[in-house]
Amino acid sequence: MFQTKNLNLKMGKVLIIGAGGVGTVVAHKAAAIPEVFTEIMLASRTKSKCDAIAKKIGDNRIQTAQVDADNVPELVELINSFKPDIVINVALPYQDLTIMDACLETGVAYLDTANYEPKDEAKFEYKWQWAYQDKFKNAGLTAILGCGFDPGVTSIFTAYAAKHHFDELQYLDIVDCNAGEHGKPFATNFNPEINIREVTQKGKYWENGKWVTTEPHKIHKPLNYPEIGPKESYLIYHEELESLVKNFPTLKRARFWMTFGEEYLTHLRVIQNIGMARIDPVKYKGVDIIPLEFLKAVLPNPGELGENYKGQTSIGCRIRGLKDGKEKTYYIYNNCDHQNAYKETGTQAVSYTTGVPATIGAMMYLKGLWKKPGVFNVEEFDPDPFMEELNQRGLPWHELHDVELEL
């Protein structure tokens, strides 16, 4: 009887790939839940980064390893030696497919926070990962896509709204505000290469059954954010829109808004105008270099911004639709304080809000709550147990009913 009880309590082993700000948060959070994450390994291209994170967490909770996430045989060797139940991919989006291939080869579940994009083209699309559906299904393995905050929690917020508050979702606006100040003239809140590629692309939104494309930052307006106030918000394209309009086909319009300060946008325009945002190689002293990769090397490390970061993020969904034949509005959001995130994990709130959901998603899998063969975006699972964990793990959410949405 005692042995059976222990078997029931046993959860699983997790391999975290990526030792940036988000990987740091996932390692901290997973280590704090030993009843779920029985063994943890943190791996990246630079093992010393993993060792530093493990040392800070202490208690020998984290094993570390070196791995090149572009190299499938290396990944397979590491996975086979550690034998995790799930791999949490918080490396670069370019590496999603190699890590998925390694998971298929080793028979291990997969989870990430950002969709795949080719290294040589700033293109955000789920088609490459959705193409793995049959492979994962036939292998009896689960792949969970986009389990950060946006994408991730914003998609789960949408699913929660559809389940509990609406008969029909019609209009969705995801709003992302970072009202924090880090004291640097210019810095990105996550990997500069990915961040700059994301925010310099053309805007795109869904309306009346088709995609509408706009010039970068052309559409903008001030929006009021809880505890923050009005902030100029810009319509940009974000990957969760693609899966949400597919999984909630009643949506007549779906958009994504993000705040940027005027100084940030000025720096961004200069970076683009002088060619430093280019992702094609240029010759310098006889050597091919990618300007954006060089820029990343000289910009502040996002993982080291936390100590002096003050203020809050506010991310949520503003939804309009029908309930019992009547129009209803609904706003669900989370505010996260940069200083609180730093005190707990040594990272700023942007890393924290991505790392906590990734940890919870892996927990959902290990508990058997989000476990089915195939490739799934997070809104395709039951949102309720995930929403409960958000409140317990440092990202409490708030809801406002029948309010002015401003959009």
Image: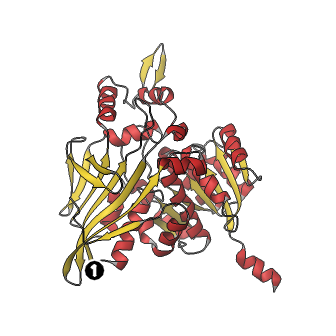
Circle 1 sits on which residue? 167
Q: Secondary structure at mark 1?
A: loop
- The answer to whether one can see residue 382 in this image is no
Q: From the top left corner, tell me how far across and down residue 27 is, in percent.
A: 63, 53
- The answer to whether one can see residue 240 in this image is yes
Position of the N terminus, as image quadrant, is: bottom right
Q: From the top left corner, tell me how far across and down residue 22 is, in percent.
A: 54, 49
Image point (20%, 45%), residue name: 214
Say left or right for 229 vs 127.
Answer: left
Position of the C terminus, as image quadrant, is: bottom left
Which residue is the extreme one toward the top? 285
The kind of residue on which mark 1 rests is: Asp
Q: So how many labels did they put on this image?
A: 1
Q: Quadrant of residue 10?
A: bottom right
Q: From the top left corner, tell me how far across and down residue 392 is, in percent.
A: 55, 67
Q: From the top left corner, tell me how far across and down residue 374 is, in percent.
A: 50, 68
Q: Quadrant of residue 264?
A: top left
Image point (77%, 52%), residue name: 60
Q: Nearer the viewer, residue 298 or 123?
A: 298
Q: Nearer the viewer, residue 165 or 74?
A: 165
Q: Nearer the viewer, residue 168 or 165?
A: 165
